[in-house]
Image (spheres, helix red, strand yellow):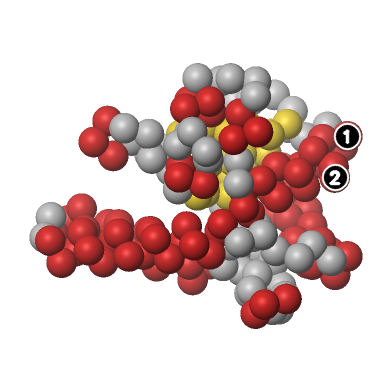
Amino acid sequence: METVRTASETGPAGQELGDETFMSAADLRNYMTEMQMAKAGKSVEGMDRAEKARQDLVKRLSQPLALTPEALRDILMPLKAKLRAAAERGQTELMVMRFPNVLCTDQGRAINNADPTWPETLTGRPRQAYELWRDQLRDAGFKLNAMIIEWPGGMPGDVGFFLKWGETKR
């Protein structure tokens, strides 16, 4: 899946914007690498590394960013470029954020059940990403879909946010 690329600037409290909206590329790569290594190795050490990577990511994403006009510009400009590129490839959706389900107050239950109140369960940067869509992108015709995209051990895991436009390919 494509990710949103933002400027490599630091915001207040030293938060660095990276490849994901509200999430650095390094954070996402580290998290995914550690999870894959843990699954492959099935070792206690590997699971400890994966859990630490997950906890670090949750800690970082639970802290909202100061969304100054400059920070919003640094998020929206590259997002628009990614959306344009996806549309040129004939795509009608783009995953713009991935995060652990513990950043939902119900661990993703409302999202999984398509409960219309699911946005109320969001915390931290996922909440900010939802509000950004609501305040900046919804009126432009974009839809936001949230879904559980990983099922470790048959239980809900990571959540993905997808911006959609036009007709969805089947």
Q: 22 or 122: which is nearer to us?
A: 122
Determine whether label 2 and label 1 are within 8 Å by CB: yes
Evaluate whether residue 149 shows in this view. yes
Q: Could you tell me how far apart the alpha carbons at marks 2 and 1 are, in whole angstroms?
A: 7 Å
Q: Residue 39 bears which disc, if any?
A: none
Give the image quarter of residue 151: top left
SS of the residue at dot 1? helix
Is residue 61 toward the left or the right of residue 7 in the image? left
Count residues near mark 1 (Cα–Cα under 10 Å), then give few for <14, some for 14-19, many for 20+: few
SS of the residue at dot 2? helix
Q: How many numbered tags mark residues here?
A: 2
On the image, the x and y values in percent for residue 26 come to 49, 71
Residue at the spot 38% in from the left edge and 40% down from the top edge: 157
Evaluate whether residue 93 shows in this view. no
Which amino acid type is marked by label 1? Asp
Q: Is residue 166 above or below residue 52?
A: above
On the image, the x and y values in percent for residue 133 come to 76, 42
Q: Is residue 109 above or below residue 157?
A: above
- Say which residue label 2 marks: 136
Q: Residue 139 bears which disc, if any?
A: 1
Q: Is residue 24 above or below residue 79?
A: below
Which amino acid type is marked by label 2? Gln
Residue at the spot 63% in from the left edge and 74% down from the top edge: 16
On the image, the x and y values in percent for residue 144 come to 68, 34
Is residue 151 toward the left or the right of residue 37 in the image? right
Count residues near mark 2 (Cα–Cα under 10 Å), then give few for <14, some for 14-19, many for 20+: few
Give the image quarter of residue 119: top right
On the image, the x and y values in percent for residue 84 come to 75, 49
Give the image quarter of residue 75: bottom right
Residue at the spot 80% in from the left edge and 38% down from the top edge: 134
Residue at the spot 49% in from the left edge and 33% down from the top edge: 106
What quarter of the picture does the C terminus occupy? top right
